[in-house]
Amino acid sequence: MDCYTANWNPLGESAFYRKYELYSMDWDLKEELRDYLVAAAPYGGPIALLRNPWQKEKAASIRPVLEIYSASGMPLASLLWKSGPVVSLGWSAEEELLCVQEDGVVLVYGLHGDFRRHFSMGNEVLQNRVLDARIFHTEFGSGVAILTGAHRFTLSANVGDLKLRRMPEVPGLQSAPSCWTILCQDRVAQILLAVGPDLYLLDHAACSAVTPPGLAPGVSSFLQMAVSFTYRHLALFTDTGCIWMGTASLKEKLCEFNCNIRAPPKQMVWCSRPRSKERAVVVAWERRLMVVGDAPESIQYKQLTIQVLLDRLVLRRLYPLAIQICEYLRLPEVQGVSRILAHWACYKVQQKDVSDEDVARAINQKLGDTPGVSYSDIAARAYGCGRTELAIKLLEYEPRSGEQVPLLLKMKRSKLALSKAIESGDTDLVFTVLLHLKNELNRGDFFMTLRNQPMALSLYRQFCKHQELETLKDLYNQDDNHQELGSFHIRASYAEERIEGRVAALQTAADAFYKAKNEFAAKATEDQMRLLRLQRRLEEELGRQFLDLSLHDTVTTLILDGHNKRAEQLARDFRIPDKRLWWLKLTALADLEDWEELEKFSKSKKSPIGYLPFVEICMKQHNKYEAKKYASRVGPEQKVKALLLVGDVAQAADVAIERRNEAELSLVLSHCTGATDGATADKIQRARAQAQKK
Amino acid sequence: MAAHLSYGRVNLNVLREAVRRELREFLDKCAGSKAIVWDEYLTGPFGLIAQYSLLKEHEVEKMFTLKGSRLPAADVKNIIFFVRPRLELMDIIAENVLSEDRRGPARDFHILFVPRRSLLCEQRLKDLGVLGSFIHREEYGLDLIPFDGDLLSMESEGAFRECYLESDQTSLYHAAKGLMTLQALYGTIPQIFGKGECARQVANMMIRMKREFTGSQNAIFPVFDNLLLLDRNVDLLTPLATQLTYEGLIDEIYGIQNSYVKLPPEKFAPKKQGDGGKDLPTEAKKLQLNSAEELYAEIRDKNFNAVGSVLSKKAKVISAAFEERHHAKTVGEIKQFVSQLPHMQAARGSLANHTSIAELIKDVTTSEDFFDKLTVEQEFMSGIDTDKVNSYIEDCIAQKHPLIKVLRLICLQSVCNSGLKQKVLDHYKREVLQTYGYEHLLTLHSLEKAGLLKPQAGGRNSYPTIRKTLRLWMDDVNEQSPTDISYVYSGYAPLSVRLAQLLSRPGWRSIEEVLRILPGPHFEERQPLPTGLQKKRQPGENRVTLVFFLGGVTFAEIAALRFLSQLEDGGTEYVIATTKLVNGATWIESLMERPL
């Protein structure tokens, strides 16, 4: 039976271990692994290796090779590194390889070594260089943190949606921290760093000193720190040989262990056995490995979902297998088959030996109107490979204009983009294209394009109304739209401070209205000019403000100020209709309580508005005496009303009875309130009874 | 909090909850304490979705109004701008961000665009050099806001002007988006009917958007049977007439904004004995008006002349209920009485409020001028003397009555005469310009452009045909217990609602001729439903029709649709959506231009 135990070796006193080779790695290392930058993706993903010649001072002349292997050791890619010195490598959750360069530029590669994109960790890095970098994973995605030569940290919590956060300065930090790590708490990424005996926590707002609870005294430096995969736990290794384990919030200690080794460990990581809740820290030195346990983990994470599994198959171009899995699992199309087909299409567009027509047709045949397929993503990929024509063909299948239009703009197909934007009805898209076109075309061509697109033209006019008034004028001119030009100049006239400027603008407006055959507006504008000039003369002569009063109010003001002659003249000049003029004078004289003048006016000729308004206005000024004078002159139709206004109920009753008007009789009756009106009421009732008899 | 939204045939609380969820999710994205900087226009509509307590739960500690220069000091981690996507607002935001004190603690900036994120605005922020300062830039698709159990509004004040004057269809796009959201929550609407140019555009956008969303739609049993899209300019007449329902009159006289009304405080002073009325409140009395208030729900849609009797009946019932306490003898009876007390007191408070409001309104409606104005309106609508200069209008101008009132009457006359004779039109225009100022020339142009004011083309008046065919004027109107929608204007049946009524029975085919006279195309579209989602109507079960007024709707029109919903043999229940709740005054106001 010894064949079963033959390859087991004792570990300590009560445990045994064995080791055997799972895969033979298909790599051919020229140097020791320690001379390489190594990054292994989580969940058995690929492994990247880059020989690190920049560590040694002289060997910079030889270009290193970047190699990528699958976890089982199959070579996936190999390429000559032509870019700058690399500080750190790491894989994102989407299995993209992030290579952080010393100059702060991060190059991104796919798992087949295909270059995807690059971004910079900020301009200040250029001067100070990157000393150290970490790639980390949170629920938001994969992030990058760097430490610069100026001992400042910058991080981006999600490289998919790059937002750089420059962390605040650590007071008194003169050299690089002895160790540091990323923490993620309350969905915010923070940096924990050790400087001598002190620990600091950096978030984007502040730097605060922290102390791990229950740490044995005597620590003068932290040599290593490690945070668990879920960011719940933290381990610290001190120069006293102590391993402190606790919560990452630094609020609770789980355990502390002194290993009596004071040499700095090469590596320290958290690990856990599958399906067990036990957590442990593994510490590695050059020739020694130590496992320190006792930290129960309460939550199991199942981050490798079916979606992630499918992603991984797709990345390895195993499309048919992925589709079979989807069908077997009966995944909804949007999450399953269509996504995989979309990936397949993105791969397909890179096949340069097939013609644009054939690729586009093949893709459409397979994808059709499959829900959830983004033709614009595929088109973007095609454009990325330099196949603009193919991209345009693919975009034709895209129903979402919001996706279609920006890509068309990027490909400089602005006019096509414009008609697509208009089709969508999304005015914001139309505006966006218009502003592109405006910068791209010369003014004449731009206006011409607008002319052929009425919807875009009216939107652009709206834009100009608020942003570029002069352009608006040019647009109206181009279209010979004299009516709008007239209105434009009217508006402009109010912006003029001097009266000459105002009149000049109004003159331009009037001319435009004539051209528009809007005689009414032209005449009205000329009247306005005339009034303005007149008002200025009045201001000079009478020393009070007239400008911007309406014609009606100007005449009223003149009467109120006692300039009756001028008022008459103005009313004649502008042909104020008689009826309105009578109302105007009546109101003004009553306001002045000039009863004598009012009476004179009432007798100047027969009133075109009757005499009831005279009664009303006198009563409004509480002058019953004057009111009564006019009540007698009110015509029969309104007499009852007038008499009631002045409180003469008895006479009102007589008139109403005489006129045999039922409505008037009721009206008078409703006014019979006091005891004194009792007789009147009776009289009306009798008259009514009599009328019914007949 | 918003139970009244779920009383109707369609539970609009589902929509409210959906938008609240979206808001919470956004707030949680900006971890830590926050201050919100508000585009002032949004605070009213937002109040219907989320009270301050919700914001507070998500660590909103401060609120500011968006204005230029530096932001007020606030010890918070996040500053969130809640804004409409408008360029002028972007300029202010940039000013805020640029003048942020660098020495102070760093604060994170975010923008929430309502209802739509805008590339144009982001470009402006980029040009101003601040785009990178924002961590989150997102949109909050608050297109249709639930106002009541059967009422949704976009509260987009410029919608009519933009659509019909400026050919800017932004609000139509938002309307279509809002309808897509509704369909995502309440299922695809199988049939779309429409009348008008804008209606056609919205329908086109919806059909297009449906194609964009293929596959991502949930299989929901359709709640709505029909959608009717109506252009406001198909019926320019109705908003011009004075509304005569209780709610309509409150709006006409005091203005209802985001379901709140502000009233003169004197009538609401608490009656205390021995108090000689010294401490009269000076601040306006603010009341929320919606169907959550039982009494209001009962009287809001009645003709105002029928409100008084309901109120006095209610008063009797309530005082009788309070009298009950004298009869309560046993402990059990007293206990029962006490348990009903809060409800009774609420009812008494509500009755007191509405009695006061009704008195305020009555002061207006019994005034001679109100009567004269109404007489003229009714003459126009029934086709009397619409083709000559009206002396009441002339007198209003001569006495400088409010310009909006005058314009409303002139426009009403023009619409009821298919345009005015050139001489009449010019006379009115000249009178307005001379009396109110030449600056109103621009407003007159706007009204002409909108078709509210125009010269009669070819000397033909088609209004009588429309009036007769659609029975817009009813002589025998019963205000107390109405039998026809014409009760809402005491004689005039709103054209828009008549179209909805005729669509449901007997169908528009019967009025083809009139539909051709009214502006814009009329159409019908079907949206196919997957098998299994097709509705099988139970016998006697009503259809549900969503009527969307593009360019605004009045409370009287809403009342008329509610009246149709309640008809026993009506067969259709209505839910109403609009770009904005309007009345004649606010509507004309939105078309005015004041360069001075």
Image: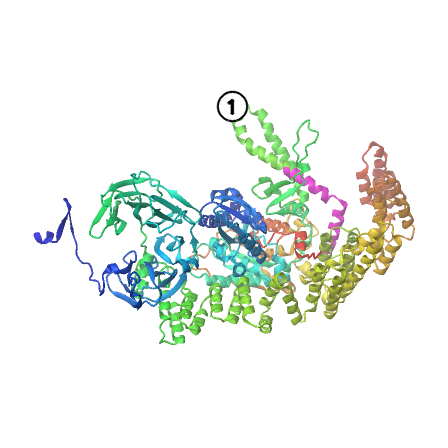
- Mark 1 highlights which residue? B331
**Front residue of A311 and B220:** A311
Image quarter (top left, top right, bottom left or bottom right) of the C terminus of chain A? top right
Quadrant of residue B85 within the rendered picture: bottom right
Q: Indicate whether B280 appears above or below A525.
A: above
Q: Does residue A694 appear in the picture of this structure? A: no
**Front residue of A453 and A508:** A508
Quadrant of residue B418 within the rendered picture: bottom right
Residue at image point 22% right, 43% down? A260
Q: Residues within 10 Å of mark 1 (few under 14, many from 20)?
A: few
Q: Does residue A623 appear in the picture of this structure? A: yes
x, y (%) of residue A92? 34, 58
Q: Please name the predominant secondary structure of the magenta segment in the image.
A: helix
- Report the side of B487 relative to A389 (left or right): right
**Front residue of A620 and A377:** A377
- Report the side of A11 relative to A186 (left or right): left
x, y (%) of residue A651? 88, 40
Residue B359 on the magenta segment = yes
Residue at image point 89% right, 54% down? A565
Outermost residue, left side: A1
**Front residue of A420 and B583:** A420
Q: Kindly identify which chain the residue marked by label 1 belongs to.
A: B
Which amino acid, mark 1?
Val
Residue A274 on the magenta segment = no
Magenta residue span: B353-382
**Which color mode does the image show?**
rainbow
Could you say whether the residue bearing mark 1 is in a helix, strand or loop? helix
